[in-house]
């Protein structure tokens, strides 16, 4: 039991960190209340009305502080991005390098997120990748973060995936069983066809079997010749040894005369 607990702990330690990033929503047009717009100049109001925002989120669902987070971008945007923590009401320490199209975030605390607000991004704008301590965030880390971010959706996806696997298993099983039944039926039909052909060449005779008639049964069975296989088929046994175990036996006696032993 103790070894199993240690094994479970080891597996948990080997799992990658649940760290991921995503765009929260599509580009939104920034709107302000009408009462505030009445106090603004026409120039300021025109800039605000032309303002659009794109929100980008980085999640740290771990128990460790993540430092030196580099956000690498392509395309362009206007104005200085705004960064806020999801849980903490403090300023985010960051540095923007426009020439390198990069934002360096000093730290992201455990079980918290940082939201970056980009203003007026162009059509080519995108976040290409996010590096933490000079290492990229892997697809597995992204999936783990997605499961933490949307637990209900993750459960639904897991259930759907499990259902698909079960359906595939049932489908493959039904195909296998169907094929097995088909070949078994074909084999049975082949034997029955052979039996039908042979039935025109023999007449059926009941043989009441007992221990003292074993020698007689062997002699009668040898006299059947090729009809012996039909006799086994009629009695649903594969060999003469099993035929001897039956109490009542149906013999397929050839109608054409055969040479006696």
Image (tube, rainbow, N blue to C red):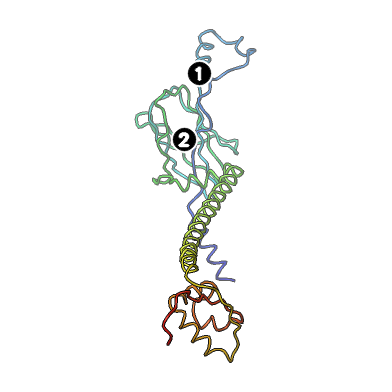
Q: In the image, residue 173 lies at what x, y percent?
A: 52, 57
Above or below, 70 against 258 in this view is: above
Q: In the image, residue 160 lies at what x, y percent?
A: 57, 46
Q: Nearer the viewer, residue 178 or 251?
A: 251
Q: What residue is disc 2 on?
A: 94
Q: Which mark is residue 92?
A: none
Above or below, 172 against 1 in this view is: above
**Residue found 47% across the figure and 69% down from its top:** 198
Quarter of the image where one finds residue 38: top right
Quarter of the image where one finds residue 77: top left
Q: Nearer the viewer, residue 121 or 259?
A: 259
Q: What residue is disc 1 on?
A: 51
Label 2 neighbour load within 10 Å: few <14, some 14-19, many 20+: some
Q: Residue furthest top?
A: 42
Q: In the image, residue 50 lies at what x, y percent?
A: 50, 15
Discs 1/2, front: 1
Q: Nearer the viewer, residue 210 or 132?
A: 210
Chain-order first, disc 1 or disc 2: 1
């Amino acid at each position: 039991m103790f070894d199993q607990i240690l094994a479970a702990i080891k597996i948990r330690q080997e799992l990658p960190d649940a760290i991921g990033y995503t765009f929260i929503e599509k580009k939104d047009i920034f709107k302000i209340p009408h009462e505030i717009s009445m106090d603004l100049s026409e120039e300021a109001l025109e800039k605000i009305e032309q303002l659009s925002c794109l929100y980008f989120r980085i999640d740290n669902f771990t128990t460790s502080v993540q430092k030196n987070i580099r956000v690498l971008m392509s395309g362009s945007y206007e104005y200085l991005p705004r960064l806020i923590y999801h849980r903490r009401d403090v300023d985010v320490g960051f540095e923007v390098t426009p020439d390198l199209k990069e934002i360096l975030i000093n730290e992201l605390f455990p079980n918290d997120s940082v939201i970056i607000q980009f203003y007026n991004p162009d059509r080519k704008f995108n976040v290409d990748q996010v590096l933490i301590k000079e290492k990229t965030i892997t697809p597995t880390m992204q999936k783990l973060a997605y499961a933490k971010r949307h637990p209900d959706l993750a459960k639904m996806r897991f259930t759907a995936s499990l259902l698909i696997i079960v359906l595939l298993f049932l489908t493959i099983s039904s195909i296998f069983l169907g094929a097995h039944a088909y070949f078994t039926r074909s084999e049975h039909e082949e034997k029955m066809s052979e039996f039908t052909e042979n039935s025109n060449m023999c007449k059926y005779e009941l043989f009441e079997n007992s221990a003292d008639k074993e020698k007689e049964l062997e002699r009668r069975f040898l006299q059947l010749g090729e009809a012996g296989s039909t006799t086994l088929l009629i009695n649903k046994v594969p060999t003469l040894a099993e035929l001897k175990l039956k109490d009542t036996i149906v013999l397929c006696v050839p109608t054409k005369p055969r040479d006696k032993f």
